[in-house]
Image (cartoon, rainbow, N blue to C red):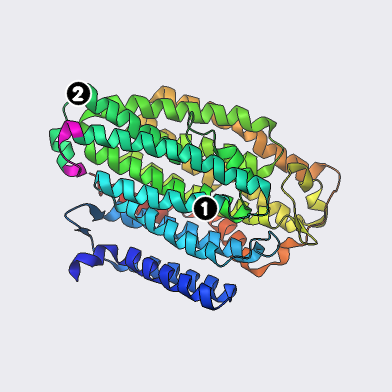
Amino acid sequence: MNIFLPILPEISIFISAIFLLLLGLFIKNIKLIINLAVVTLILAIVFVIYQPIGTAFNNSLVNDEFSKVIKILILLGSLASIIMYHSSRKDLNIDLYEFPILILLATIGMLVMASANDLIAIFIGLELQSLTLYVLASLNRNHLASSEAGLKYFLLGALSSGLLLFGLSYIYGFTGNTNLNLISTTVAPGNIGLIIGIVFVTSGLAFKVSAVPFHMWTPDVYEGAPTPVTAFFAMAPKVAAIAVAVRFLIVGFSDVAFEWQQIIIFLSIASMVFAAFAAIAQTNIKRLMAYSSIGHVGYALIGLACGTEQGISSIVIYLSIYLVMNIGVFSFILSMKYKGEHYENISDLSGLYKNHPYYSVIITVFMFSLAGIPPLAGFFGKFYIFIAAIESNLMLLAIIGILASVVGAFYYLRIIKVIYFDEEKHSFDGFNHKSLHLLIHPSAFLIILFCLYPLPLINIANYAANAFY
């Protein structure tokens, strides 16, 4: 039984998902299924916290400090998405018991990704996650935009999976191993075939995190998918994919860091710069958040480009803050509701301060944090990333990141301007939902608290980075 201890969270979620699937077939009580899914994820968090460090399946899955922290972030993102779904399922016409089950199945794939120390395990985790995400994107079958989002995501996702698998086969062919620890012992600089494999795998992972130039699916899918699904896409899958990239490159290919570092630097710069300018013209807040997520992935990739312990630590800090900010923002977007109708345009926030001054202040906190304005948590997330880049002699990358942040601040501040200075347009009644209060208020509190007491998160990030050094 000790063999299964490192994968106890995955096993518990799998058993629960199968049980809930059978339960949903016979008992049409969606609220009960949602509550049981929430309990499952909370139990999984407890299992992750208390499970021992170790490996499973001949070192294919590793439960170390890094994977434990990443798994908790993934589980929190999944938990928040289910709570958002519960608050909006009837209004959005997606009152389906399959949603929490699909979230649980996607979560299993992401937990496998966080622990994957083998090429086969990486692919299995990615595909389990991806197949469920395709279904989630098109969950609202009566809405044309949702069906279109699912189809676009599926077609481009299949292409990225092909690129990823082609790269994995190249790496196996040139090293003779699938385990990352064994691959690291056979890697030699100058091996062209191996570099080709790394390029293809990195391209496949770049699609999963929507890094430029593999971002083309993101705005359409974010806009077309139901808002709880969009929130899920913006949080947990990105954390899992970045975690895979970190383990894949740091554990397997640290000896050829110079080769893959150039790829990561390009992806980072392209994502930051493109997102900063492309988001300016957006009028839909979900499309705006799509470009925002592209930009934030670019900042997170700076930490990976460093390839140092400080760089990995800064990634964990950044992803943690990014997750909390997105939970708050998407909970707020779901609250943009009046008489059962949800609004998604930035102009719909006109004059919000006149009717909802308290929630206007809260969204201001979220937007300032996303923009990286001190002293909020978003500023410190970027601060640690840029410090890691400077310490790794990537000064130019840090400068480009700072300039992109300045440009990107424009579209966040524009929302603030609309809220406080434009003419009053709507009086929303969606702020009364208790389940959204469970997300909005703790998120705002944590964003403010970090500037006063950052030590716990810094210690957690250093604890995670110790797994590789």
In the picture provided, is 54 more to the left or to the right than 305? left
Residue shown at 42% from the left, 25% from the top: 266
Q: Quadrant of residue 375?
A: top right
- Lateral position of residue 31 relative to residue 238, left or right: right
Along the line of sight, the residue nearer the viewer: 178 or 333: 178
Left or right, 338 with respect to 457, comes to right
- Give, as a three-letter code, the residue at label 2: Asn
Quadrant location, the C terminus: top left
Instruction: Look at 39% across and 27% down and name the residue there.
Output: 265
Residue 329 is covered by the magenta coloring: no
Give the magenta part as a residue range. 173-181
Element carrying mark 2: loop
Does residue 79 sit above or below 414 in this rendering? below
Q: Earlier in the sequence, mark 1 or mark 2?
A: 1
Mark linked to residue 191: 2
Residue 267 image point, x, y percent: 43, 29
Task: Give the left or right position of residue 389, taking residue 56 as reference.
Answer: right
The residue indicated by pointer 1 is 135
Taking depth in this image into account, of 180 and 449 the one nearest to the observer is 180
Element under disc 1 = helix
Q: CA distance from mark 1 to mark 2?
A: 39 Å
Quadrant where the N terminus lies?
bottom left
